[in-house]
Image: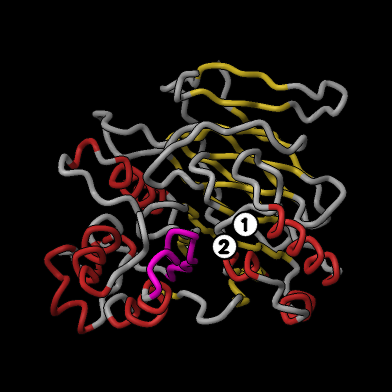
Amino acid sequence: MLRRRFLVLTASAALGGALWGAVSLERSSQEPRPRPIFSLLAVGDTGKPRDLVAALDPGLAVAAALAHADTQSPVTGLVFLGDNFYPDGLREREFKDRLRSNLVQPFCHFIRLTPRGQGSLKEACPASEADRHPVPIHALLGNHDYNERESPLLQRRRIPDYLENWQMPLGDFEIRELEGGVSLILLDSMVWLRGEPGDALTRAVRNSRGPWRIVAAHHPMVDTGKSAVPRFEARMKRALERASVPIQLFLAGHEHNLQVIETPKAWPRLHVIAGSGSDVREPTPGDAGRRFALADHGFARIDLANTAGPLRVTLQRVPVARMGGPSGQDVARFSIDLDGTVRNLHTARD
């Protein structure tokens, strides 16, 4: 099967089938968008070591496309969905080298260095802060980030000594109340693979301000085929159902592709996977609610134009080693209302 293939599932349950076809490489939506009051860029699995030939490095292409997306329409935050450092996480002996190559250099547009970072990493991010757009970087840990015992603590405690806007939860989860009435719920999904942390998350989600709620974790909580993590799915479902509040969106990585899955009868209503920040794998048959899947590098953008909504989700694919600039291409756009109504605004076809 060709690498750049995508799957679009029709919204009609009566059809219940999949349409496979080749991606149109030049298709891109350039329609103007209203400036949002809240906007996130989300990408996972960015941690592949850099290619010696920069023009062939997919991670650098994705980072450049993220910066371009922000330049075109500024965002209020960036979410890293885990697996920030392959293959085994972050080690002390290579700390500054990996910080330089995997974060500071590719994501310079979004970085704000601390005085210590200025002293040792400035050459990797030479642009002035006036020429950049530092925003909060909401970072999560993935399964590869746990392979080295020292890695989680280095990412949680040491990186902020160098990157002022790096904000990784210090515990199992953290809820951040953001612009536009958005409660961003950040989860360490590896904790949930080892056991269920009790009712603390349920209470916190129930008490979150909302009315918009976005959950972000490394692992998806829906069936995506071979990479499904049943224990995480079951535990998350129980915890969020007990909270008894609307959760419109779930963001995840781990899958190394781009997907949109709808769960019409349960919260979170819409699941968006953007785990192809540096590597790509084919989607496998999974959840019957899958509306879109694409094996390509890319990221997700989430916009809220006003507090009444809707929340708009755009998936962008990023051509790698392509002349003509760093911009991504819209391949799927969905919206979701406060009540959970999902609309398919655009999916790329032949």
What amino acid is found at the position of numbered circle 2 in the picture? Phe
- In this rendering, the answer to whether 340 lies above or below 23 is below
Q: How many marks?
A: 2
Name the quadrant containing residue 278.
top left
Q: Residue at x 54, y 39 (%)?
A: 258
- In this rendering, the answer to whether 281 lies above or below 14 is below
Q: Position of residue 251 (x, y in %)?
A: 60, 55
Which span of residues is magenta-colored? Answer: 136-149
Q: Is residue 143 found inside the magenta-colored segment of the image? A: yes
Q: Position of residue 115 (x, y in %)?
A: 21, 84
The residue that disc 2 covers is 38
Q: Are the residues tagged 2 and 1 within 8 Å (C-beta)?
A: yes
Q: Is residue 349 found inside the magenta-colored segment of the image? A: no
What amino acid is found at the position of numbered circle 1 in the picture? Leu
- In this rendering, the answer to whether 111 lies above or below 329 is below
Q: Which mark is residue 48?
A: none
- Viewer-side residue, 232 vs 37: 232
- Viewer-side residue, 24 vs 216: 216
Q: Position of residue 199 (x, y in %)?
A: 78, 80
* Real-space CA distance between mark 2 and mark 1, rounded to the nearest whole angstrom: 5 Å
- Viewer-side residue, 105 vs 226: 226
Q: Position of residue 31 (x, y in %)?
A: 51, 35
Q: Residue at x 60, y 65 (%)?
A: 189
The residue that disc 1 covers is 304
